Image (cartoon, rainbow, N blue to C red):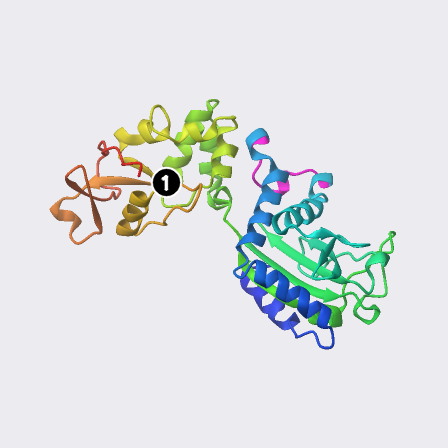
Amino acid sequence: MDGETINVQAALWSVDESGDPALDTVADEIRRADPDGSRFAGAIRRSIDMLLDGQHTGRFRWDQLFKTEKAHLGTLIEINVQREFDFADGASMDYSIAGSDVDCKYSQTLGQWMIPPEAHGHLLLVVWASDEQSRWSAGLVRALPERLNNGGNRDAKKTLNTAGRQAVKWLFDGAPLQENMLLRLSEPDIDAIFSHKSGQRRVDELFLRAQGLRVSRTVVATVAMQEDYMKRVRYNGGARSRLQPRGIVILGHYSSHGRIAEALGLPVPGPGESVSARLAEARPEHGAAPRVELDGREWVLAGPADPEQAVPKLPEI
């Protein structure tokens, strides 16, 4: 199911909850604490990354997990959301939010949240996320009997029926999740990166092959598989100095690097992110290509016809 289909479905399911002031109060409290959803998205990203544990395993895809590990993601999201927002424990459900007991439910399939008998009648914070699509959603619904399917699994857990899915009040619908850019690389690129035995050489290969993409600290940790993984990016022996003779710059979360990225039309690195690109000294044949001044010379993004040449060291301010 693609992201567009999911957004359409979520829109069809979204109707205002009527006659439930407690739900509205909980919704207002979450939106007040997280107006743009960035805190919630961060908790989901951390949960997925904790499960993959790329720094120690080199894993970055959902299908690399064991079945028992996949079943644990809902628990991690429940824990990390509570930590992020400092929700109190509920009397009988996961959280107490604005005076109401709220149970947190995650499903990797939108709409297929499993609801146990003890949650019937309670408010549910329903969450969906896809690392493949870099999207997530969260909403609120009360688990009333008429909103639940008649059948259940052997634990007597039920799912929302059509009326229940339509009653979900979406707080965040198809919102962006920080991208796991390793999922965007081709299989040949992935094979080339992980073919090296040295963590430093894997990181070098990553920045050679992932030019123009935001690379998070988690991705670097997954590729390096070492405790001092960010050292593998820096100057003084890291990828920045090792790739410098080949014209590769690695932009980080510095003000000057952000200006360089903007000038060249590259993504601006956020906190903990890096973006690599190969540069060439500007020549007449580059025409009106965007350019930046480094060490008194003008540079443009290199094309296939541009030879490799050493690029100046970037300021780290």
Residue 292: image location, x then y, percent = 21, 46
User: In this rendering, would 117 be left or right of 235?
Assistant: right
Q: Is residue 3 visible?
A: yes
- Amino acid of disc 1: Gly
User: In this rendering, would 121 be left or right of 165?
Assistant: right
Say above or below: 57 vs 279: above
| Span highlighted in magenta in the image | 57-67
> Which residue matches tag 1?
252
Which residue is drawn at the image coordinates 67% and 70% (left, top)? 24
In magenta segment, residue 65: yes
Which residue is drawn at the image coordinates 79% and 69% (left, top)? 147
Q: How many marks?
A: 1
Residue 82: image location, x then y, percent = 67, 49
Q: Is residue 168 visible?
A: no
Which residue is drawn at the image coordinates 55% and 49% (left, top)? 42
Residue 230: image location, x then y, percent = 44, 31
Viewport quadrant of the C terminus: top left
Say above or below: 129 vs 279: below
Q: Nearer the viewer, residue 178 or 78?
A: 78
Viewport quadrant of the N terminus: bottom right
User: In this rendering, would 288 be left or right of 187?
Assistant: left
- SS class, disc 1: loop
Q: Quadrant of residue 53?
A: top right
